[in-house]
Amino acid sequence: MVRPQDRKFVTADPEKCIGCCVCEYACSMINEKTFNPTKSRIRAMRIGPLVNLAVTCRHCEDPACVAACPRDALTQEENTGIIRVDENACNGCGWCISACQFGAMNMHPDKKIVFTCNSCTDNETKEPQCVKWCPEEALTYVSAETLAQKYRQKAVKNLFQTVEEEAKKAKK
Amino acid sequence: MFAYAGKILHVNLTTGEIKTESLSEKMAKDYIGGIGLGIRLLFDNSKPGTDPFDSDNPLIYLTGPLSGTMGPTGGNSYAVVSKSPATGGIGNAEAHGFFGPDLKRAGYDAVVIKGKAPKLSYLWIDDDKVEIRNGEQLKYKTVNETDHMIRNELGDFYIRVSAIGEAGEKLCRFGAIINDEFRAIGRSGMGAVMGSKNLKAVAVRGTHDVNVANLPGFMEFVKLIHERMKGPATKKYKTLGTPENVLVLNSLSALATRNWTNATFEGADKVSGEYLNEHYVKKVVGCATCGMRCDHIAVVPEGPYKGSTSRLEFECLWSMGPLCGVDRLDAVIEAMRIVNEYGMDGISIGVVVAFAMDLYENGIITKEQTDGIDLKFGNAEALIAIIHKIGKREGWLGNILAEGVAKAAELIGGDAYKYACHIKGLELPGYDLRTLKTAALGFSVSFRGACHLRNGAYSPDVKGKVNRFKIEKGRGKMITDESHMYNIIDSLIVCKFSRGTYYDGWKDLTNYYTLATGIPITPEEMMTAGDRIENLARLFNIREGKGTRKYDDVPYKIKNFPVPDEGPAKGVCVNDEEMQIGLDDYYASRGWTAEGIPTVERLNQVGLGDLAYIAENAMKAAKEAKPEAPVPTVGGN
């Protein structure tokens, strides 16, 4: 049994992501065997040159998409947090799309049912393909716990930045 | 076919007729895509002597074979080809960003737009559904406003828009077409052709699959290029960016300053790549599918232009900075921003303003004629003020300058032509040709007019591979060989910043092409395609009466104003004798006649026998005409 804080999902670092869409192409290439961002489970959002971020399913606890589905077509895998779509049950009503706060549920253009991140795993890196291909190393496949630690460390380091610098100067 | 869409879209804005034709594999392989295919389609879809602003002049959008794939830089590109209102010959430019792949996914290798819409319109390509829509609400809107308004109207954030601003609508001869805020089909006035058709924008949404022939092999290649992009081949573009050139060229006395008055700039340190990155660059972003990223986004932190945001590359930094004697980067960033909003070529606009400043300083135009603007070199406020006037075609001078330096000089008359720095009507880019003479020869023979990207002839000069103060035998072949590569780069439409990542040159490019398309091609065949495209472009220029020896020349100032700055370049300028030696050498290396006309034999060798009649007619005309001395190009059409 995997603890919820240890479940991994794909997240983008806003400081590194440049909205280049390589993740979209990698995703559609692996999962759909073609190049087509409209069939990607991760989408890059470029609002302006300085405002970019790739967004995909965060494998929420108590996922709103699952709760919203009137046909019980969506289930969350307990160990991984991945949202699975029952292709026979889903009729593409899109209620889960409006329920998701991240816009991570998408309508598949050919299959006419919803689809979302399946944390596809690369044999070599054991990470999803988008993470493997991201040229900026902006994407990470990470657990909530690790992510929290990363940002805590950063916040504390920032707070004591001046103290550290002064200490360095004093050493010199 | 793989990777190619296999389809050409034809739109007639006058009649509203919309139809498609298929692209044959032979045509695809012979002309690759991008500008190669574009120039062929221009040939086949236009009549000789058509005015660039005539509704019969086709405006041709093109994707490359790699557009829409995950190929780095090749995946995100498109090109536009038309008859240029600046030169009267071939007009072409390429842009990257996010627009190109959607056009490919919509299902088109090319879109040939003819006619003129009865009122301002935009073209909406939604996969197979193509519609000419009312664009009157977009009149004089900036490029960015147009982009937002169209996406709002059509209700999809991911729609990609390629649009003109006020300058294109008002037929500014260096009007640009811009996508993704600052990615420009910049040179040779393609935006003005679009404006002449009452076409404000092309909006596209493509949702079809793009498939490559050999997916595992293709992905291996992409991985290889991604790796190389992390290495030395792209370091410059990822770190300081092209503005690194400022100090490099300045140290070589090759940083054209104050409209080619000087070759060094005393304010270079204040407009250097180093200074730009330290004080202004906020983030470095990139285009779709690219593993490199090079877009240095500069934001002005304080002062009168606080908050002004723009991407800035060397060429535009130079043209609106040192060339105008301006040493204030905050003003250059603001100038770049407004140039993008009006939709103008960032190189030409700087050369145009510097030309006007030169005329003002030399008393050829007066303060009355500038509407009170003190157009002295170095006046940053004047630079901004005159750009607004040109973008709007406001006032006597603003209206004249929107014609570009060649036509403006004709309209102003007198000695003005001596200060107009252009080749075939297109303004010079950022290299001092007096001290970089391979570049002088290379730029003079470029088929789209003054251009550093048709054969990269500045490179051997800057890298010290040749005596750059001299034109001598052997330069012709250098230029010829490189031109084939540059033609293929613009036909595959891979980014020129990526050219260093193809370590194995032609072999890498043919491999890239075949993995994607499944069409076998050898390096020799691809080189011949590059040669074919060069000859084709030359034939077009000949057909339009702009393609013979007398048009291959450098501007008056480059020949008659020796470099005054102290240092090794003092006293240097290009003399006519070496220019003629260079042209003879170049034509010989191409297998062209002394008049610069491709021979029938040569055309047959590169598979252009069907167009040999154009060369034959030109040779006949050259024989009949009295031999005349080469004259400085007047340009225009």
Image (cartoon, coloured by chain):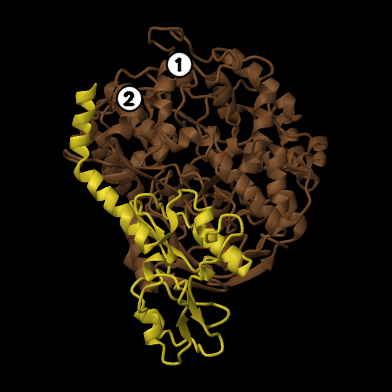
Vertical placement of residue A120 versus B519, above or below: below
The amino acid type, in three-letter code, at marker 2 is: Asp
Give the letter of the chain under mark 1. Answer: B
Chain colored yellow: A
Inter-mark Cα distance, 2 to 1: 23 Å
Which percent across, then down, holds residue B51? Answer: 54, 49
Disc 1: CA contacts within 10 A as few (<14), some (14-19) or many (>=20): some
Which structural element holds mark 1?
A: loop
Tell me if I can see residue B367 in this picture.
no
Which structural element holds mark 2?
A: helix
The residue that disc 2 covers is B358
Residue nearest the viewer, comparing B409 with B628: B409
Instruction: Write the residue at 52% across / 28% down.
Output: B633
Q: Earlier in the sequence, mark 2 or mark 1?
A: 1
The residue that disc 1 covers is B252
Quarter holding residue B387: top left
Quarter holding residue B18: bottom right
Which percent across, then down, holds residue A73? Answer: 48, 87
Q: Which quadrant is home to the N terminus of chain B? A: bottom right
Disc 2: CA contacts within 10 A as few (<14), some (14-19) or many (>=20): many
